[in-house]
Amino acid sequence: MDKKLNPLNNIEDWEDDLLKRYPENPSKKTEEEFRDYKNSKRAEGVKEFYKLNHQYQSYDFVCDKEATFLQFNHRRMSLWDAVEFLNTLVDDSDPDIELDQLQHLLQTSEAIRDDGHPDWFVLTGFLHDVGKVLCLFGEPQWAVVGDTFPVGCSFSNSIVHSEYFSLNPDNSNPKYNTKFGIYKENCGLNQIKMSWGHDEYLYQIMKNYLPQEALYMIRYHSFYAQHKEQAYNYLMDKTDLKMFEWVRKFNNYDLYSKAPVQPNSRALKPYYEDLVAKYLPDTLNF
């Protein structure tokens, strides 16, 4: 893959940057204990990532990706098989810990389970990043991970590296570059197209199987301009505002559950197999 179209060393560089931007962590660890940020090349890679993301994540781009991937004809597999498939995305440059994708999912879900939350919440923690299999279908990272945002209306200055939206064709299109764009005030997020990535993709796969709270967590856990900055309240309806309390609750586990002690995946697998079977069919179309 052309390096210019894949500026991050690996899929977790974006998550490292999140910890740097949102250091409020509820554990006793300091921000530095989670990640080491003295490597300036990582920051440059994240910056280049958002340049590409903001340049190409237009309304038409999102429509094209939906048409391509929401046919769910790339692979049929169980959720556990999807996790194992995702696990081929190994983090080779994490300076602190060497955890694969499965370990991150288990750390998130086990932290949720330890706090006594409902089992559907635990399952959400376990599967929330499975949409990253898009990378294994040939998608560049800037079209899979990254902070998400609405398309079809003006881009908020609260979005990370918002200066790069000047490169986006929608920024100069009068149909899309106003506050409401093609939408109406408080129309609700279900009427809004979000930038394309693993969040929306997995939501579309799971939308018939999980509770509404879980679906909001999956669909909007990367929508930082809203759940951290409240930048798009004018598009949200009452249901959105209520459900985003769950999104914020989830993000504490997603961002700050990482630790060098690996969960025992072999011992935990029977529990998660039963949990998956309770909510999901044996196989899913990806």
Image: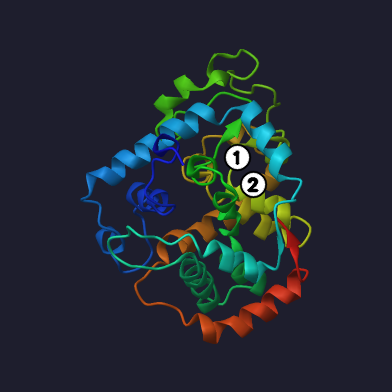
Q: State the image coordinates of residue 4 (x, y, percent, origin top left).
A: 40, 34
- The residue tagged 2 is 200
Please indicate whether residue 248 sits to the left or right of residue 257 in the image.
right
Q: State the image coordinates of residue 224 (x, y, percent, origin top left).
A: 49, 44
Residue type, numbered disc 2? Glu
Determine the residue positioned at 32% across, 60% down: 94
Q: State the image coordinates of residue 196 (x, y, percent, origin top left).
A: 60, 40
Secondary structure at badge 2 equals helix
Question: Is residue 189 or residue 167 the one in the foreground?
Answer: 167
Please determine whether, in this image, residue 74 is positioned above or below residue 6: below
Determine the residue positioned at 74% across, 50% down: 72
Tag shown at residue 172 = none
Secondary structure at badge 1 equals loop
Determine the residue positioned at 61% across, 12% down: 174
Find out whether the residues at labels 1 and 2 contact each other: C-beta distance under 8 Å.
yes
Q: State the image coordinates of residue 80 (x, y, percent, origin top left).
A: 63, 71
Is residue 269 visible in this depiction of the protein?
Answer: yes
Residue type, numbered disc 1? Trp
Determine the residue positioned at 79% across, 58% down: 208
- Say which quarter of the image contains residue 119: bottom right
Tag shown at residue 196 = 1
- Say which quarter of the image contains residue 113: bottom right
